[in-house]
Image (cartoon, rainbow, N blue to C red):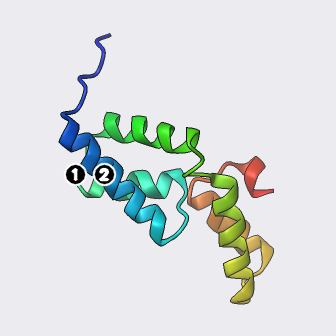
Amino acid sequence: MTKPKALPEDEAQQLRRTALNLLARREHSALELRHKLLVRGHAEAAIDAELARLVEEDLLNEGRYAEVYAHSRADRGYGPLRITRDLRERGVDPETVE
């Protein structure tokens, strides 16, 4: 297996800037953020590396995302079963959902 090529600096910076801009608007699950970055044309391997970096820096935190999401939906009248299902659909691991 070959090591993935490093992205040119400007592409890596653009990927990071896009990810941070999305996270500045609201919390995202890793799955949501990954999908949005893929749609914007970023390379899959580069996205995975950047997501890992964001998690390490605690800028991407699924526990925090789940909490914000659950409170937001509960305030709108959604029940716990619906919120649980929605979080799982968004890629949040079952342990975090509980």
Residue 76, position as x, y percentages in the image? 69, 89
Distance of label 2 from label 1 (alpha carbons): 5 Å
Q: Could you tell me the amino acid type at mark 1?
A: Gly
For label 1, the residue is: 41
Left or right of residue 4, residue 31 in this image: right
* Helix, strand or loop status at disc 2: helix
Left or right of residue 41, residue 18 in this image: right
Q: Quadrant of residue 68?
A: bottom right
Given contact means CB atoms under 8 Å apart, are the residues at marks 2 and 1 in contact?
yes
Rendered position, 62 above or below 27: above
Classify mark 1: residues with Cα within 10 Å, few (<14), some (14-19) or many (20+): few
Q: Which quadrant would the N terminus be assigned to in this image?
A: top left
Q: Quadrant of residue 55?
A: top right
* Helix, strand or loop status at disc 1: loop
Q: Could you tell me the amino acid type at mark 2?
A: Leu
Rendered position, 86 above or below 96: below
Left or right of residue 30, residue 95 in this image: right
For label 2, the residue is: 38
Q: Which quadrant would the C terminus be assigned to in this image?
A: bottom right
